[in-house]
Image: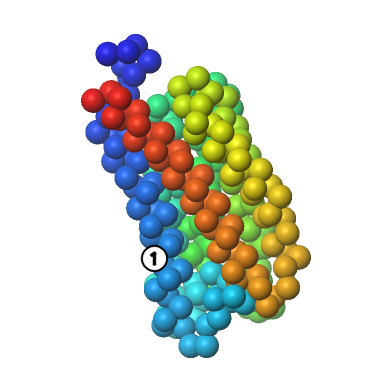
Amino acid sequence: MNHRFQHERPALLLVLATLGLMGCLSLAAGTMIAPWFVPDYDWVSDTISDLAAGSDEILMDVALYGFAAGLLAVSIAAAHAHLGKTGWSIGTMSFAVLSVVVVIVAARNEYGDGDQGGIVIHSYLVYGLGALFLGGPLSMTAGLRSAHPGARRIIIGLAIVWALTAPLFFFMPTGIDGIYERGLGVVACGIVLTLSYVFYARARDIA
């Protein structure tokens, strides 16, 4: 066995990689199924947050919890198969924090809609998601350079797309911000899936 794999457990990495995949599938399923239960929902103009509020919020909430579990799985896998130095550690912690942020988004029913009944924090959570989905993956690219150069290039490419497109969400007309947000979700899932594949590949190579 290669010395660089000696501390890694293939079964654990495989389970965590699978959870990362399932987290993305959960998010995708939620965004496809929940709209059928929300009256007058518009895929183009209404956001994912609109699905997570109201009488049928549980459907999207569960999907977001699943995605949060996938993010946490990626964080644990990254900590287990530590491929870098400080940058990798920052990325590992970023995914852990991302999972917490997504849970808060799902659990809290305030979406910055002008409701004065509580503290409006949704916008700040969205800012956090934007920053963490950029900084976290980028900080891990040095660790991917030698063992997983293909994944490194994909992560850099997705991070560039995220950096260019995520800030524009706040300036999107309300008539199209829903479909734009889904596009950002695809980029985020692409990042998670790429890292999940890295951990799957390491589990396969160890076995």
Rendered view: 9 above or below 133: above
Residue 118, position in %: x, y? 62, 73
The scheme the figure's colours follow is rainbow
Residue 193, position in %: x, y? 44, 45
Q: How many marks?
A: 1
Residue at coordinates 34% horizontally, 41% vertically from top-left?
16
Residue at coordinates 55% horizontally, 52% vertically from top-left?
187
In the depicted view, which residue is nearer to us: 126 or 166? Answer: 166
Rendered view: 186 above or below 172: above
User: Hey, which quadrant is residue 153 in on the image?
Assistant: top right
Rendered view: 162 above or below 113: above
- The 10 Å Cα crowd at callout 1, few under 14, some 14 to 19, many 20 or more, is some
- What residue is shown with label 1? 29
Q: Is residue 200 left or right of residue 113?
A: left
Question: Would residue 69 be seen by someone viewing this image from the given angle?
Answer: no
Rendered view: 54 above or below 104: below
Q: Which quadrant: the C terminus?
A: top left
Question: Would residue 170 be seen by someone viewing this image from the given angle?
Answer: yes
Residue 47, position in %: x, y? 58, 72
Q: Which quadrant: the N terminus?
A: top left
In the depicted view, which residue is nearer to us: 148 or 72? Answer: 148
User: Hey, which quadrant is residue 203 in on the image?
Assistant: top left
Residue at coordinates 49% horizontally, 51% vertically from top-left?
189
Q: Secondary structure at mark 1?
A: helix
Residue type pointed to by label 1: Ala
Residue 107, position in %: x, y? 48, 65
Residue at coordinates 54% horizontally, 31% vertically from top-left?
152
Furthest-right residue in this view: 171
